[in-house]
Amino acid sequence: MSRKLLIVLSTGIAAAVLALPALAQDRDAAQQALAQSVTLQVEVTPDSITVGDPIAINLLLRATAATQVQFAPEFDAGDAARLLEFTESPGGPVDDAGRRAWTARYTLGIYAVGEKMLPPILVQVQRDSVTTTVTTDSIFVFVESVLDDSLKVAGMQDIKQQRDLNIPWPAWVWGLIGVAIVAALLLWLWWTRRKRRPAVVAVIPVRPADEVALAALRTLEDKRLPLEGHIKEHHVQLSEILRAYLEAAPSFRIPALEETTDEIVLSMDKGGTAKERIQQVRSLCEEADLVKFAKHQPPVDECMEALQRVVYFVGETSKPVPVVSAAGVGDTTTREAKS
């Protein structure tokens, strides 16, 4: 009796093992059939934006009424974009073909300039006991700089090339040329007989970073953008001036134009900048981020106050302080202040 039971069990196990590849093929075929029965459409509005403007990615999925749909609530695009809002709607009414529509919207803030390729979005679908995942293609957007738009609005264009005028030279001009040639020869003879003096190399001074920043701040203040309702443009330009100063100032020298707020704070902390200065920069950058990416609209007085805070920061961090060397107290060597 026990031998017959053992033979039956062995036969059943062998049949189950032999059936596993067929079951796997059936499962793959069912998943492929489910994916082919689903249509997924993507709409991006707008396809071209400026830095900080929101962009909406709308998904429309159609499937049979018995299908269950799960959109991914997160969207990871790295440093190129930030998910501001995610909304989805359950399946709508069933149409004549027995299909239903599901929609989802991803609202993103993109704060990098140029051509950007966003990753595909995953959507999980399930019908009966079969589950599979459908994806969109990679999403292409183009992000323009706010400063480029300002130049276009101002109507600035490149200088036209100089036109060639074929005007014959009068005789007296040729006479002057002859006199100049003779004078040049005489000057050359006189110069060769002189004792040669060492050449003097002209040194063109580099404009200090604080002067460049303060000049840009004065220009921004004269524009009075907040009074005209251009809150976002005011904060974008103010943030770029501050970041450019952090890159050029000898006391910082950090790639602030290419870093996020948290990366700027980390770079300043590694460079030994005082905590008070780090907090000032963090506060200014975070306020600008709120305006650019979260549609925050501060009052006009707060906008002008932010500009004055940048002016104060530049002035304080560019003051020279004495450095006492090992030679003694009388050393007058100076450096720019970090504190």
Image: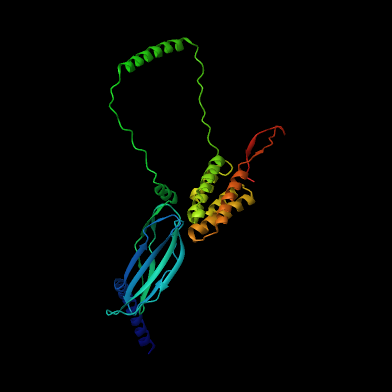
Number of marks drawn:
0
State the quadrant of the N terminus: bottom left
> On the image, which quarter does residue 322 sit in?
top right
Q: Is residue 140 left or right of residue 222?
A: left
Taking depth in this image into account, of 39 and 142 the one nearest to the observer is 142
Image position of 208 with respect to 281: above or below: above
* Coloration of the structure image: rainbow
Taking depth in this image into account, of 234 and 331 the one nearest to the observer is 234
Taking depth in this image into account, of 105 and 226 the one nearest to the observer is 226
> On the image, which quarter does residue 90 sit in?
bottom left
Q: Residue at x 63, y 45 (%)?
A: 316
Taking depth in this image into account, of 213 and 331 the one nearest to the observer is 213
Q: Residue furthest right?
A: 329
Q: Is residue 271 visible?
A: no
Q: Is residue 234 visible?
A: yes
> On the image, which quarter does residue 298 sit in?
bottom right
Q: Residue at x 40, y 56 (%)?
A: 49
| Image x and y of residue 230, in percent | 48, 55
| Image x and y of residue 310, in percent | 58, 49
| Image x and y of residue 54, in percent | 43, 61
Q: Is residue 162 left or right of residue 248?
A: left
| Image x and y of residue 199, in percent | 50, 20
Q: Residue at x 41, y 10 (%)?
A: 186
Q: Residue at x 43, y 70 (%)?
A: 87
Image position of 280 with respect to 125: above or below: above
Q: Is residue 211 left or right of residue 165?
A: right
